[in-house]
Amino acid sequence: MNKMAQKLAPSGVARDFGFFIDGEWRHGREMFERKSPSHDVIVTRIARCTEDDLNDAVAAARRAFENGTWAGLASSERSAILLKTAELLKQRRDDIAFWEVLENGKPISQAKAEIDNCISCFEMAAGAARLLHGDSFNNLGESLFGMVLREPVGVVGLITPWNFPFMILCERVPFILASGCTVVVKPAEVTSATTLMLADILTEAGLPKGVYNVVTGTGKSVGQALTQHPDVDMLSFTGSTGVGRSCIHASADSNLKKLGLELGGKNPIVVFADSDLEDAADAVAFGISFNTGQCCVSSSRLIVEESVADKFEKLVVAKMEKIRVGDPFDPETQIGAITTDAQNKTILDYIEKGKAEGARVLCGGNKVDLGRGQYIAPTLFTNVKPDMSIATDEIFGPVLSVFRFSTLEEAISLANDTVYGLAASVWTKDISKALKVTRKVQAGRFWVNTIMAGGPEMPLGGFKQSGWGREAGMYGVEEYTQIKSVHVDLGKRTHWIA
Ligand code: NDP
């Protein structure tokens, strides 16, 4: 471990967190102890909230919504608080990154870059708050005038996962707040710290009490109760497709709350023979290894043109073998720990299934022993058949499967051969091929000769079983609003009853 990593390593003293309702911290009666997945020591103690706590949080969010202390502000005032939050995040960047790394296991350099993106989300949302507007219809005839008012949806429930605890939060919360809604957040239990830390920052920035509330605990208890709550107007959920489906049932069985869902992916990266193969190989290795592949937009299916496939596989292997797996506090580390024990087992099980089903490992395929923590080497499988589990399932780890194509149509068909439609990437120097693939492949996010590029201006979300709705950008903020058509009679009524 280098000196910087030693300096940042966990102190051995776990930090206790309460939960946050109506502008105040509360203590939990039962606590969950979170171990750092990289260091095997307890780093945080997180409250296990009860259903009563959740009811209090929703009631606080309801009061804050109805009393107009937030939705009733001028957009310039809401915007100012979002901008102040961005300023405070700049000051606390290193502290937030530290806790993110301890609970999640991601490399410190990556955690800091993610927080920069979070700052950008608050800045973008500050602008979006001021741009939100309705519409008018002056073409309904002499005596009728139409207006379309855009109003906040109300109380939003937000359930976030453990892979990007702070970034996924910040791709949603600023936009929810920009719209005038209030929110109750339930983070993944294993990575709750930074969601709780945001409460103090928002308060310091001037957010009125009750607008941002956090309840902690497991998905099965407090998360499920949030999805079923009759006084939550909208739910934004990010996580597995299975739980996404249960959110739909919960909405149907309660109050038909509006849903935003960002779910799984099995994302294709299509590489044509005419692309810059060195660049493409780097992107392929990055696309599957970034965040240890625990990323909904990981490009986990490489679809490469047959004529260059052997050569390209070698280029990718050379890149993947150079990736630095290590202690996440080492600034040189590119791949950190696998975040949860369950996910570690899932990934290792898929690697074994891939071998058993006849796919061939070209690199990786094993754990990396660093003396403590749980690490997996970036893994490349070739000879993968479309019906193998490593070809169809979202593994959510650094495991890449290779497929080969001979024609453009075959490439498109392979890319679409999945129930998911979250993201896709295409590599070629021929613009017409790039656009044909972009138009025919079903995915909510597309990258041409790049991978995972973007910022909060661009909407996020999926086609097919990857979800409903969009987050971020103007499209994202509009999801948290509803529109009302207003008809104004300007003349004298023509009587129906003479
Ligand atoms: P889950 O979908 O279970 O977890 C995501 C969030 O939902 C967490 O906050 C979790 O809480 C909560 N949750 C769990 N069960 C319920 C429920 N019944 N009702 C309401 N909320 C619930 O994902 P896992 O952590 O189990 O990961 C499993 C797989 O899901 C991964 O292997 C990956 O394939 C996929 N996934 C996809 C993500 C994405 O970004 N699209 C993110 C995470 C996972 P808690 O964790 O506290 O129990």
Image (cartoon, helix red, strand yellow):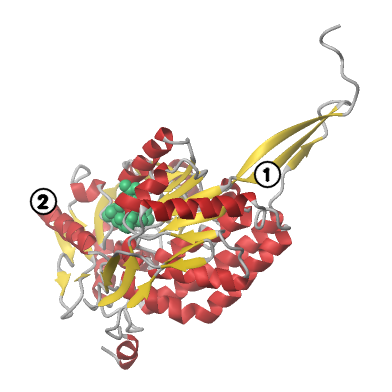
Q: How many numbered markers are drawn?
A: 2
> In this image, 420 relative to 77: left or right?
left
Q: In this rendered view, identify the residue nearer to me: 103 or 113.
A: 103
**Upstream in sequence: badge 1 or badge 2:** 1
Q: Amino acid at mark 2?
A: Gly
Q: Residue most toward the bottom?
A: 3
- Residue at 49% x, 78% y is 93
- Residue at 64% x, 67% y is 81
List x then y, in percent, for residue 234.
50, 45
> In this image, 36 relative to 260: left or right?
left
Q: In this rendered view, identify the residue nearer to me: 379 or 65.
A: 65
- Residue that numbered label 1 is attached to: 150
Circle 2 crowding by C-alpha within 10 Å: few under 14, some 14–19, many from 20: some
Q: Residue most toward the left?
A: 356
Compared with 30, 110 (above or below) is below
Q: In this rendered view, identify the residue nearer to me: 462 or 408.
A: 462
- Residue that numbered label 2 is attached to: 358
Q: CA distance from mark 1 to mark 2?
A: 55 Å
Task: Kindly indicate the quadrant of the structure image that contains residue 38.
Answer: bottom left
> In this image, 245 relative to 383: left or right?
right
List x then y, in percent, for residue 460.
49, 53
Q: Secondary structure at mark 2?
A: loop
List x then y, in percent, for residue 380.
22, 62
Q: Can residue 328 be seen? A: yes
Q: Can residue 412 be seen? A: no
Task: Kindly indicate the quadrant of the structure image that contains residue 182.
Answer: bottom right
Check whether the beta carbons of the residues at disc 1 and disc 2 lie within 8 A of each other: no
List x then y, in percent, for residue 340.
25, 64
Task: Kindly indicate the quadrant of the structure image that contains residue 373.
Answer: bottom left
Circle 1 crowding by C-alpha within 10 Å: few under 14, some 14–19, many from 20: some
Q: In this rendered view, identify the residue nearer to me: 336 or 147.
A: 147
